Image: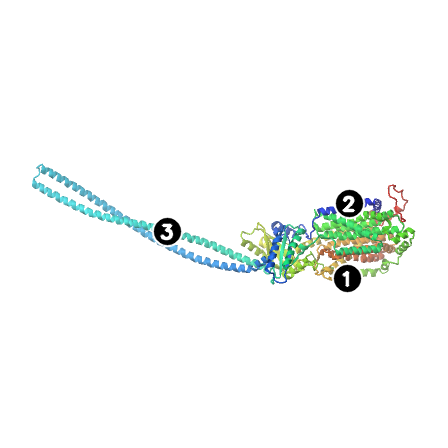
Amino acid sequence: MAILLHRLGRWCATHRWTVVGAWVALLALTVTGMLTLARPLSNEFSVPGSRFEAVLETLQAEIPEAAGQTGTVVLRSDTPFTPEQEAAVADAVTAWEELEGVTAIDPFEAQAALDGADTELADGERQLEEGRAELEQAEADLQEARQQVTAGLEELDAGEEQLEASAAELEAGRAQLEAGQAELDAQVQQLDAAQADLDGQLQQLEAGVAAGQVPPDQAEAARAQIAAGQAQVDAGRQQLGAGQAQLDTSRAELEAGEAQLAAGREEIEAGRQELQAAEDQVTQGEEQLVEGRAELEEGVAALEAGRRNAALSEGFRLVTQDRTVAMTQVSVADAGGLIPPETTSGIQRVGEELAATGLDVTYSKEITDDLSSLLGPGEVLGLGVAALVLLVMLGSLVAAGLPILMAMVGVGVGLTGALALSQWFDMQSITPVLALMLGLAVGIDYSLFLINRHRQQLRHGMPVRESIALAVGTSGNAVTFAGLTVIIALAALTITGVPFLGVMGLVAAATIAISVLVALTLTPAVLALIGLRVLPRRARTALGSGDDHDTAAEDARHRDTHRGWAAVVQRRPWLAILGVLAIVAGLGYPTGQLRVGLPDGSSEPADSSAYLTYDTVRDEFGAGANGPIIAVAELDTPVGDGETALLTAQADLGEDLAQVEGVVRVLPAGVNEDRDVLAFQLVPEGGPAEASTEDLVNRLGSAVQQIGDERGAQIGITGQTVANIDISAQLADALPLYLLVVVGLSLVLLLLVFRSVVIPLFATGGFLLSVAAAFGAVVAVYQLGHLSAVFDVHEPGPILSFLPIILIGILFGLAMDYQVFLVSAMREEHVHGLDARTAVVTGFNASSRVVTAAAIIMVSVFAGFVWAHLPMVRPVGLGLAVGVLVDAFLVRMTLTPAVMSLLGERAWWIPRWLDRVLPDVDVEGARLERTLAQPAAAPDPQEEPELSPSR
């Protein structure tokens, strides 16, 4: 490896402009890609397949209007809101909803509806009572009408019976009349026959008289007899006429009776029709009464459901009682965890217009998050401190600026390339910041190690290009292996199964890899360009005059085993060990109180709009209003039609959810079109990051299962606290495997580097001390509030949920860096023939100055992020700063010399079979130096002439 790197360094120094041009072209390419492809970053943390993510996906699919990214706007007034201000807010809500995908709530209109709920319920109850009274009166009226119809029918039936009797009588009278008429007609026929007989007798008599055949006396007697018969006939006819007159009178009476009977029948039929119509009206009234009863029961059920739902949301307000503070929600659909910058600026632009009405408007962090900037004043200050350290150590502005320039190139290529890839991969705001933090720190350090080795070699008279190649072959070897440990630790974050953490690790690992490549290629090229100007003017003058007094004095100091910190430690190793353990114990004691969470508005700067909004909502509307828990119920059977069925179903589930300890109120949040998915907002007692809310989520986990079984539903929960618990649980499950992979691979690397079993194991053990100190410092400051004024922590809270695993991974990689840089120098001295104890001191003296500077630089860079404009970055910066400080100065520069001094030669023990199996990576460059000590081959005539120190 050392020989390959030596060749690479020599080639880069020879073809310096080619190398510089390639890196400039690469930087231009990545910058162009960033400008054309980069998407806005996000603060949304998602874990596909987790509980909260699955519920959120259901909510987005079934009730998308309840799944949008929601921000809060708080409106304040020194005096109660005026009608003009309320009208201005209504206009602002309208303007917000004109923005693409935005829905907003008019707080005054919504509060009026909430305030009027009791009145509406009372009015509804009064209307129900009136309806009940009307139904009862209608029922009584219908019962009376039914009785009247029944009585009328009975009367009609009696009249009809009388008519039938009269009809029978009339029929009998007509029969008698017909019989009398027939008898009278017979008598008339008899009289007609008698008349005809008399007329015949009289004709015969007159004929006989005329013929003289009848004597006069006989004729007279006959005539008298005929006259007597005629008189009888006439008397009979007179009697018959009287009888006919009687019959005609009876017939007229009968016909009159029949006419009366027909009129009676018509009257009864008309009465029956009237009664039928009345009965139809009664039947219709009874049907209406049944419908009225059903409507009344529906009204009662609706009133009861409304009362139950009102009880669930009792105390919920959007406008305070004194009407000086109002809160409204602005939701953006399909925001993907981040409200687009153009939408947030539009929301704030509309809100600014409210200031003219005397309103003070603030916004939650979802609306005010500005993820467009990666560097802030703190980070710049950290770079300034690093530059000062470099200037003091290197004594030359050119040399001091070179490591920073190399780090900026590496970070520039890495970050712009990563941001260009954000077109295809979701990226959180902390991802490029973490890469920037690490890239700057290791980029400066890695270049510094090469530059320092190169400067030392130049001081000893080595030609520039040869020195560059040797520096890359030796220190570059250590840089490569040190970088590999960091890359392994970061890339291994992918095995956690948390996508955003994997992306974070890969982006940072890629940035570290690019920083290593910059150190191994661009740094040699630039060193070749600047030549001897990498040395201070005094050193160049001394080198040109052949004065090596300063160099000899420095070499003597390195070889002096009685001077330096390592010599002090070696004289009192147990005291050094106990001192380190005591300091680490003091720093690490708060680690046991570690509680993790996700950032909320309480972690924002005290004077920020986001914190003012969070604090106002907490004070005026309750802490739980800042982060409600969302419950989504998937019903086995859809809710029936009608508003009452929906309200009842919501009340049934809502009351069960409200019984869970810690739930203050339950608010229905929506229903899907198929009416088989219901959403609820559960408002907890505490804020989203408080321990009480975390306890509530744990209780809800089992409670919703039981409620779902009883109600025939599958109920899930989501929200910030749920996400925190799920992410923390997944990270806790992944941590053992992560540590196994990272520590295992790093131990193999360290075994290759140091060819020792003891040193890699001790290096790992020392890392645990650094982690404990880093965790303790973070918990003490950001969770317990110690030194809060110094670190601008106005409201302590839980630690970022993924900070522990990130801190462990990064610190492990960086700790191995310092282990490699320090102990490889000791091994180099040991390989060159010094005994183990002497090698500890001389190796330490040779490398401690640059390691000290590198550690101070790294601590400075990390510390600059303690006051970063992104609050979630701050604890990461502090943890890394304290971790590196403890690891470099206590563990690696104090504990390591003490332990190695006690172990002596045993520190380098390795089984012979393992020594034979392991490849020789020659990290200290001993084999390379032996190769270079051999007679050199003839120079390549195409190469440029070598720069000598005198030049």
Q: 350 or 241: which is nearer to us?
A: 350
Does residue 2 appear in this view?
yes
Marks 3 and 1 sit apart, C-alpha to C-alpha, by 107 Å
- List the residue tagged with mark 1: 586
Marks 2 and 1 sit apart, C-alpha to C-alpha, by 50 Å
Per the rendering, the mark at residue 272 is 3
The mark closer to the camera, 2 or 3, is: 2
Marks 2 and 3 sit apart, C-alpha to C-alpha, by 108 Å
Does residue 768 appear in this view?
no
Q: 311 or 488: which is nearer to us?
A: 311
Crowdedness near tag 2: few (<14), some (14–19) or many (≥20) residues, C-alpha within 10 Å: few
Q: 539 or 910: which is nearer to us?
A: 539
In percent of the image, x 24 and y 49: which residue is there? 249
As shown in the figure, which amino acid type bears the numbered disc 3? Answer: Arg
Closer to the chain start, of discs 2 and 1, is: 2
**What element does badge 3 sit on?**
helix
Crowdedness near tag 1: few (<14), some (14–19) or many (≥20) residues, C-alpha within 10 Å: some
Q: How is the image coloured?
A: rainbow
Q: Position of residue 170 (x, y in %)?
A: 28, 49
**What element does badge 2 sit on?**
helix
